[in-house]
Image: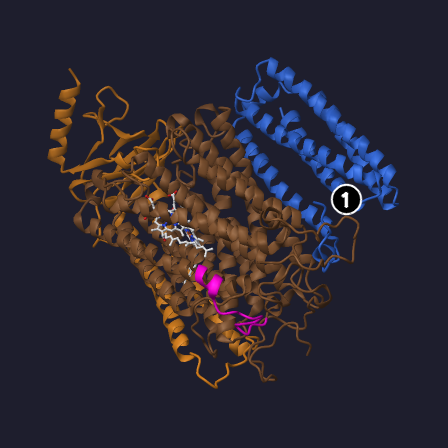
Chain colours: A orange, B brown, C blue
Amino acid sequence: MDRFLLQASTYASSIDGLILLIGVLVGFWFLLAEGLFFWLIWRFRARPGEKSQYLTGKEKHVKRWITIPHALVLLCDVFIIIGSVRVWYDVKQQLPEPDSTIRVIGQQWVWSFQHPGPDNVLDTDDDIYTANDLHVEIDKTYHYKLESRDVLHDFSVPVFRLKQDAIPGRSITGWFRPTVAGDFDIQCAEICGIGHGIMAARIHIEDANTHAQWISAASAATTP
Amino acid sequence: MADTVADVHQHESAGHDDHHHEQNFFVKYLWSTDHKIIAMQYMFTGMFMGLIGGYMAYVFRMQLAFPGISVPGFGQVSPGEYNALITNHGSIMIFWLAMPVLIAAFGNFLIPLMIGADDMVFPRINRLSFQIFFVSVLVLLASLFVQGGGFGGAWTSYPPLSAESTYNLTDLGSSLWLLAVALEFVAFLLGGINFITTLMNSRAPGMKAYDIPIVCWMIVIASILFMLSVGPLIAGAVMLLFDQVLNTGFYDPTRGGDPILWQHLFWFFGHPEVYVVLLPAIGITVDVIATFARKKIFGYKLVLYTAVATGVLSFFVWAHHQFVAGIDPRMANVFTITTLLISVPIAELLFVMIATLYGGSIRLTTPMLWALAFIAEFLIGGVTGIFLGASGADIYFHDTYFVLAHFHYTFFPIAIIGTFCGFTYWFPKMFGRMMNETLGKIHFWGTIIPFNFIFIPLFVLGMGGQHRRIYNFQHFPELAGPEMYQLREIATISLLIMLAFQAVFFYNMIHSWLKGEKAGKNPWKSNTLEWTTESPPPHGNWPPDQMPVVYRGPYEYAHPDREEDYWPQDEPA
Amino acid sequence: MAHAKPLATLRSATGIPTGRLAVWWVLASEVVIFGGLLGSYLMHRIGHPEWAAAAAHTQTWIGAVNTFVLLTSSFTAVLAHQAAERGNGKEAAKLLGLTILGALTFLVIKSFEWANEISHGYTITANTFWSFYYTAAGLHALHVIAGGIIMGFVAFDAYRGRELHRVELIGIYWHFVDVVWIFLFPLLYIAK
Ligand code: HEA
Ligand code: HEA
Ligand code: CUA
Ligand SMILES: [Cu+2]
């Protein structure tokens, strides 16, 4: 996965690891099934004068060909479930203590972000509001409060492997912790009308200095 | 096609019988209650809609690969039009191609013939079912041309976007779309009741439950599944319609409603629905494989039980579409477990089909090629479903092209490969003539190879984070790179090639229909009852005094006690 | 076009007459429709205790009268079935007539009730409780209307001694309509 896309959050690598695990397990079965399949087609192609065999599939030793794979697939399922639930628990179910909290609001067709400002407390006078630009500091744990003003949107940051629907009338809290500095895409991943395709934002992950500079510059611009 | 010959019904109520006078074209083909004619009506309506769905795919794929160009045969695609195109492409392919062809057309044609009955139990309800379906087609097509354009809120139609015209900007289009879907559901409920009761009650004398060909079972299990899952969505659709036209607030959070409710109602139906179309396709494949491998299928009852198990499980997996939709995160774990469990019965179905090949004498006719391709390609769709079913991985994959490629690798084998498989296999029975094998094989390879070249690139794009339903990727720097455009172009060009090869199919179909070699009763040397009557079967299917009687199961190929390698079901021991 | 019945309709591999089998499947599909609607309502109702205030404006006694009317009509439907079993088509038709009368009474009472509520401003858009109230009861009323119409045709045939088995079928359907109301009544009227 990291060949396709940078891993820029703490949980990106665990999600990719899970994908790899599934890939190996089902990949094995997939190759086995396809291999057997094509071999059988070749091996038992029609040859003149040869009649096919009469097998009912009722005898025990024949049935084993189905029941043993059956049990093994079930076993693989168990591994996948365990892996999946662990990752899920990490990303969605538990919330580590935040260093900072932001608010993300989707509306047709723009993302607005409410940063906590110099005092690092959300919903105070010095909050910084931006449209389509989210500024965060590297290696800090963030909580986001996700809201929507009209229809469903979906806050998706591919480099974080993060995705969460925004629902009008609710505020959904989640978390992330960036690990790589840079500017990345934020996409809206839930169809929200004709502007769904332009609902793009950027996330700017900055080191502590740059981030502090941005905060002071931005608050200077907003507070008269 | 079917002639209106001798009246099979003389034995009862001769009083009001108008079979004997000459029937005009309208009565014969458009007002008929004959199950075979209704089947053909469904078949050709579905084929027509499939072409429209394919045309839409062509238009929006051109836009995706070459954004902003004027698409030949359509013109420039605006964002609103793009949304309407994908929405209606999805809806048409599922509700107006897969459902009518796999369930209604094959169900109507095959069930009475395969169980040795002269018609459906309620022929007039059957006709009504098609008429309602036809109205739904007209309503859907009309919805594309009204003020504001067709509905563009995706085939899943999530409110509040779908509920309020201030959000979706397609006031009339969204209501007509919803109405069309609702009418289609009613048509299939009526049809389904017919299929179920016919199979339960009208079997030929001697035909026990385990003598019924798998494909009939599958269509009926699918109908039951449909019937039991669609109810809540019908209720939900009424609520959504009221939200749209009466301005109620069922899904409006500011007025005490809940937008997520729709998602639950939709997917409670939506997931079983994918198995509703999967099972008939598997049924067709199993029958074709048994015939051309000259093999008894490996475990008849196993197929049946796993199909039922799949059906039952499918009621408990729906929220895997909503992992990141704001449901309680603890619930996601439950649905991960049920979703992964469903891989077991489906794997078993596929293993049975593969195992059936063992010891066979495989003939690679065109229908057989389609059947084998179904297995090979569906496996890809199936295993990629596991990535999505694992909640942790779905956080990343949700609503990317990975999902899209997953379900095209399931739906395409079902709705296109499966129908071509059934169509080429039963063509001799339907029209009395053989199809051309060479043309059939050209069409097969010309469809299968481009198919993989369309959707493999889309898997890669999905891994790269490309999201669905975006008409132009220029606003997302990570998605606008040149390699990504290359992949999109490969997909689109492959689609053009595939569409071009469909001409071969239509030429083959029409040419064989008119001039093909005469088929005779049983060209494939198959066992099931439909091959014991004329091709095409007359009105009433068999002469009234020669209705078939059944002595054995449908898959007795290569029985050791027989000289011939097949043993028709109706042949006395 | 009057059609002769195909052989398929006359067979009965399960031993259950085809018509009855079909009616049961129709009911199965209806059960899930109403099930979905009432399930949604219940989920909302639990989430919104304040709806009790809106529900207080429904008139329980009217609902109770209507319950009584429907139950009575179900009873006459049973009597019609028994008459049909005895082969007495005329008697069955008369009793079905009474059932239709019950349906009409139900609808008349319902329309007075709704007119009164709407005139007080409790329309379908007033709030989501009222939306559910009108949708659920309206869907049920549609079933009452459809049942009444079909019953008219069945009675017409029965009077001439034709298709007597249909008296039983429409009876089964009518009991179902009744049972749905038995669920609606407490949910919409009594729960306050
Ligand atoms: C007929 C079509 C069809 C079929 C058969 C399936 C089959 C499956 N689907 Fe798919 N699915 C769709 C059509 C279909 N799906 C559609 C249309 C959507 C998108 C809707 C939308 O949003 O628009 C979708 C979306 C979708 C999602 C939601 C993704 C998202 O939006 O985030 C998920 C998540 O769990 C999922 C899972 C599965 C699973 C687990 C199966 C399983 O049934 C697959 C089982 C098969 C196998 C597993 C292969 C055989 C087994 C083996 C070879 C053994 C080895 C296996 C193991 C060791 C596990 N599907
Ligand atoms: C059965 C289902 C089905 C089928 C077959 C297809 C077929 C195709 N689909 Fe589609 N698609 C969906 C179901 C289906 N699709 C759904 C549900 C969506 C989601 C919509 C949404 O987001 O809301 C979707 C969305 C979708 C998108 C995403 C758009 C977006 O999110 O922005 C794309 C993009 O490439 C796409 C492409 C294609 C292509 C290239 C084909 C090609 O394979 C098409 C080729 C067509 C033909 C070759 C026609 C041949 C048919 C016949 C000739 C009839 C034969 C009949 C008989 C023999 C009786 N589809
Ligand atoms: Cu916002 Cu899509
Ligand atoms: Cu699903």
Above or below residue A57? Residue C99 is: above
User: Looking at the picture, how far across and down is residue B523, in whole percent?
Assistant: 53, 72
To which residue does mark 1 refer?
A: C166
Tell me, yes or no, whether the highlighted magenta stretch contains residue B511. yes
Q: Is residue B469 left or right of residue A50?
A: left
Q: Is mark 1 within 8 Å of ligand 2?
A: no
- Quadrant housing residue A74: bottom left
Q: Nearer the viewer, residue B373 or B106?
A: B106
Pointer 1 chain: C
User: Looking at the picture, how far across and down is residue A38, in whole percent?
Assistant: 38, 73
- Quadrant housing residue B8: bottom right
Q: Nearer the viewer, residue C80 or B387?
A: C80
Can see residue A38? Answer: yes
Q: Amino acid type of disc 1?
A: Arg
Tell me, yes or no, whether the highlighted magenta stretch contains residue B101. no
Residue most toward the bottom? Answer: A49
**Residue at horizontal 15%, vertical 27%?**
A215
Q: Quadrant of the N terminus of chain C?
A: top right
Q: Name the secondary structure under disc 1.
A: helix
Q: Is residue B563 left or right of residue C96?
A: left
Q: Quadrant of the C terminus of chain C?
A: top right
User: Looking at the picture, how far across and down is residue B319, in whole percent?
Assistant: 45, 45
- Quadrant housing residue A191: top left
Q: Nearer the viewer, residue C123 or B148?
A: B148
Can see residue A14? Answer: no
How many numbered badges does the structure rendering display? 1
Q: Nearer the viewer, residue B136 or B414?
A: B136
Query: Which secondary structure dominates the residues rendered in magenta?
Result: loop
The magenta span reads B510-527
Above or below residue B101? Residue A38 is: below
User: Looking at the picture, how far across and down is residue B279, in whole percent?
Assistant: 51, 58
